[in-house]
Amino acid sequence: MNIKELEAEIEDLKADYTRLSADLEKLVYVGGNTAYNEKELERLAAKISDLRQKIQQQKS
């Protein structure tokens, strides 16, 4: 993947992260099960971090 593709994927993941974060807040408010959302947020954060590292590697 080139840098533009990596950046586009990061933007998509950030949108998913924002959506899941809002869903998590709603679940916490109503006392729902938050385990899935928490795991997904961790997975997305790790993926975003990985993609950012790939961008840095390609720039250097």
Image (spheres, rainbow, N blue to C red):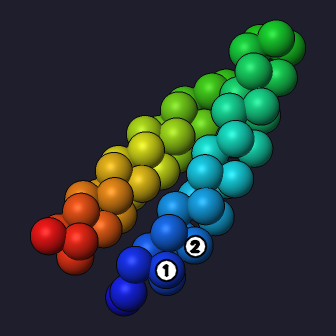
Q: Position of residue 34 (x, y in %)?
A: 63, 27
**Residue 51's quadrant in the figure?**
bottom left
In the image, residue 5 above or below residue 10? below
The amino acid pointed to by label 1 is Lys
- The residue at 33%/50% (across/down) is 49
Q: Are marks 2 and 1 in contact (CB under 8 Å)?
A: yes
| Viewport quadrant of the N terminus | bottom left
**Residue 47's quadrant in the figure?**
bottom left
| Viewport quadrant of the C terminus | bottom left
Question: At numbered mark 2, what does the secondary structure look like: helix, strand or loop?
Answer: helix
For the question of whether residue 42 can be seen, the reply is yes
**Along the line of sight, which residue is nearer the eye, 31 or 41?**
41
The amino acid pointed to by label 2 is Ala
**Along the line of sight, which residue is nearer the eye, 31 or 56?**
56
Q: Position of residue 37 (x, y in %)?
A: 60, 38
Location of mark 2 (residue):
8
Q: Position of residue 46 (x, y in %)?
A: 35, 48
- The residue at 69%/53% (across/down) is 15
**Residue 6's quadrant in the figure?**
bottom left
Location of mark 1 (residue):
4
